[in-house]
Amino acid sequence: MRTQVCIIGAGPSGLLLSQLLHQAGIDTVVLERQTREYVLGRIRAGVLEWGTVELLERAGVGARMHAEGFVHTGTYLSAQNRGFRIDFDGLIGKKVMVYGQTEVTRDLFAARDAMGGVVIHEAAGVQPHGLETDAPFVTYTKDGTEHRIDCDYVVGCDGFHGVSRKSIPSSVLRTFERVYPFGWLGILSETPPAHEELIYANHERGFALCSMRNDHLSRYYIQVPADEKLENWSDNAFWDELRRRIPADVAETLVTGPSIEKSIAPLRSFVAEPMRWGRLFLVGDAAHIVPPTGAKGLNLAMSDVHYLHHALIARLKDNEDDGIERYSETALARVWKATRFSWWMTTMLHRFPDQGVFDQRIQETELAYLESSVAARTALAENYVGLPF
Ligand code: APR
Ligand code: PHB
C-alpha cells in the first residue's frame, strides 16, 4: 500500500491530523494498535482551550462540542478551604470549553468515517523504517499477515509508550523529565457538579480538583502518594477526603454517589527534543507529557497538529520546506511554555512529601498574591486559556 502520510496512533492527535490533511486533499493512513472501543474507553481531562475549539471547528467536528460542551469564563483556586475566582473573561476576554477528551475522540472517529478515512485498528508490531531516506515505509502485522505502507512522511502520534520516539537514535534524542512524588486518584460519578466552574484546591492534606463532564456527571481528583493502592479507597473514603480539602461552602452542598470509574494516574513532566528526525515527526504525547494540573495535555497535542498540518500541506502541495524544517523548533517553543505552566500549577497546588513549613508558607503566599494581584491573575489566565498558536 502507498500513502502520502502514514500516521501511527489513532488518539486525538493522529485522528485530527489525518482529518485536516484529508480535507486539504492529502492521503493518509492511520495505524492503531488497539480497537476503537479500547481507545474510546480511556477517560482523560476535559478542558479545551479556545484555540483547540477553533481548530476542531475547522476540522468539521465542532457541532456536538458546541451543543453539549460548557463554556467557562473562569475557574476557582482555593487555599485552606477558601476559594477565589480567576475571571478569564474579565481579565483577558477569553474562555475555555469543558468537553471531555473521550468525546473529542469519538467525534473525530465519526468525522474520519464520514470522509472515508483509513484507520487500521489492531495493527501489531508497527515499525517505521528508512526515516532518514527519501522513501520511508512502515511495516505492521494484522490478522497474522505482514503489511508494508510506503509513504512520504511518517508521523508518530502514538503516545508516550509508542514506537516512534524510540526510532530516533539516542545520539540525537534528548529527553527532559520530572517525575512528581504523588499521583491523582480520580473518580467519575453520576452526580451534579459541586460548583458551576472548576475548583483547584490547595490544602495541607493535599491537592484536590472538582471538575465535571455535564450537569449530571462529575469528575473529582485528590492527590495521593505515588505508590497508593486503589483498593485503599472506598467511595466513602474518597468523598470524606475530598470534602476536607475543598472550600467549606462547596463541601457542605457536595452531592455524592457511587463512582462509575476510579483510577490513579501518576504525574510527570517530559519533553523529547527534537520533534522531527528525517522524515519522522512526533506529535502530542509521543513527544511530551505534562501533569494534568491545568489540563494542557490534549491542548498541546492540538497545537502540534496545527503547526504540522500547515507544514505538511505546504510541503506536499506547494513544495515549500520551511514549515517542516521549523516544525520542531516552533512546536517545542510552545511545548516548553505549557510545560512550565503545568509544572508551576502543580508545584503551587500540591503537597510535596519533603515540604516543610517554609515551603507551605511560600505556597500560601503565592496563592494570596494571585488573589490580590491583577497582574498575577492575568498571567495565570493567559496560560490557562492557552497561549496563541
Ligand atoms: N502502534 C500503533 N499505535 C500505537 C502504538 C504502536 N506501537 N503505540 C501507541 N499507539 C496508539 C495508542 O493505542 C493510542 O491510541 O497511539 C495512540 C496515542 O494516543 P494518546 O495517548 O491519546 O496520545 P495523543 O493522541 O497524542 O493525545 C494526547 O492524550 O494522553 C492524553 O494528556 C494527553 O490529552 C493528551 C492527549
Ligand atoms: C478533568 O475534568 O478531568 C480535568 C480538568 C482539569 C484538569 C485536569 C483534569 O486540570
Image (spheres, grey):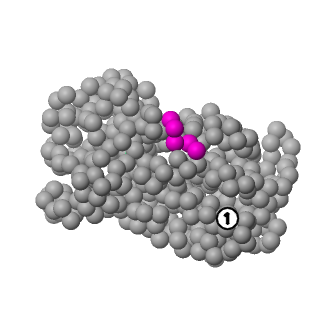
Q: Amino acid at mark 1?
A: Leu
Res 251 visible: yes
Q: Which residues are magenta?
A: 60-64
* Residue 246 locus on image (x, y percent): 21, 40
Q: Is residue 362 magenta?
A: no
* Residue 167 locus on image (x, y percent): 69, 65
Res 262 visible: no
Q: Taking 358 as reference, is 116 left or right? A: right
Mark 1 neighbour density, 10 Å: few (under 14) some (14–19) many (20 or more):
many
Q: Is residue 372 above or below residue 183?
A: below
Q: Quadrant of residue 241?
A: top left
Q: Taking 65 as reference, is 94 left or right? A: left
**In the rendered image, which residue does mark 1 sit on?**
312
Label 1 residue SS: helix
* Residue 211 locus on image (x, y percent): 34, 39
Q: Which residue lies at the image location 63% right of the left edge and 40% below the top edge?
A: 111
Q: Which residue lies at the image location 53% right of the left edge and 48% below the top edge?
A: 56
